Image: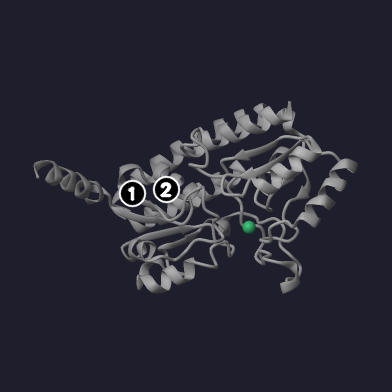
Amino acid sequence: MKNILFVMLATLATPACAALNIFACEPEWGALARELGGDKASVYVASTALQDPHRIEARPSLIARARSADLAICTGAELEIGWMPLVQTQSGNARIQAGQPGYFEAAAVVPLLEKPARVDRSMGDVHAAGNPHIHLDPRNIARVAQALGERMAALDPSNKNEYETKTRDFLERWREATARWEKLAAPLKGMPLVVYHKNMTYMIQWLGMREVANLEPKPGLPPSTGYLTELLAKLQREPAKAIVRSAYNDPRPGEWLAERAKIPSIAIAFTVGGTPQAKDLFSLYDDTLERLLAAAK
Ligand SMILES: [Zn+2]
């Protein structure tokens, strides 16, 4: 009984000293909020690296968490269109509705790639606002950190100095790390890759790699055997170095292709928690580059 009471008190003590109650749609934004908020932020992350961020279920536990949030941080650009609007409505929390200061979209402060000129249903699950998978280019993380730090300070002015200091400190460490990653990743330049979804586009562009094929015939559509056979023929004409999937993707199509094309099939964390090594944003990048460099050899 004494132990139970202690655990209850310990659990209650955490949010009591935190000023800002944060609901993060994806692990990368939860990790960033922790960097910028420290002990002033209590962060709940709505999805894990093993879940497809396009397809999260708006279950009652998420809605309950959203109800008490001061700030919801999502990718935006329609990534969460299948679940977040429902969470927002069902939560009844006026603070985190679209257009309110308590709803922050990371994609809104980043120049988006691949904005389609037109979208129709025949194209599959195309992201009409542009590619929302922005977090694997560190320059985008820096843009988001700057804007998010300002937003946190505006929502919790009593701790403004704290957020400003933490944001400055994060950006400085992040700039140094980015320079280090760019040096380290030099051998990846020109590396031809097969990807699973258009979710590594920003990293490919940042490091000058090349996407030669995509395992999805159309965005959101898993490959058929016929399509994989076509890809195999394509890879025989235009070889790739590796097939890269995210932790949440089904490994089987890539492994089928890898075996026949005689190239490695590798998984990257994609976001924080996707591998045991990817514990925060810094180690996410360290680990991802390490895995790509091993495949480039
Ligand atoms: Zn997508």
Q: Residue furthest left?
A: 2
Query: Residue visible at 47% across and 48% down?
Result: 27
Amino acid type of the residue tagged 1 in the rendering: Ala
For label 1, the SS is strand
Residue 69, how many percent across, how many down?
34, 61
Dot 1 and dot 2 residues touching (CB under 8 Å): yes
Side (left or right) of 20 relative to 199 = left
Report which quarter residue 102 is drawn in.
bottom left
Query: Residue visible at 35% across and 42% down?
Result: 38
Please rate how many residues cluster around mark 1, counting C-alpha atoms within 10 Å: few if below 14, some from 14 to 19, many from 20: many
For label 2, the SS is helix
Residue with the mark numbered 2: 33
The relative height of residue 181 versus residue 76 in the rendered view (above or below) is above
Report which quarter residue 238 is drawn in.
top right
Report which quarter residue 293 is drawn in.
top right
Observer-nearest of 220 and 167:
220
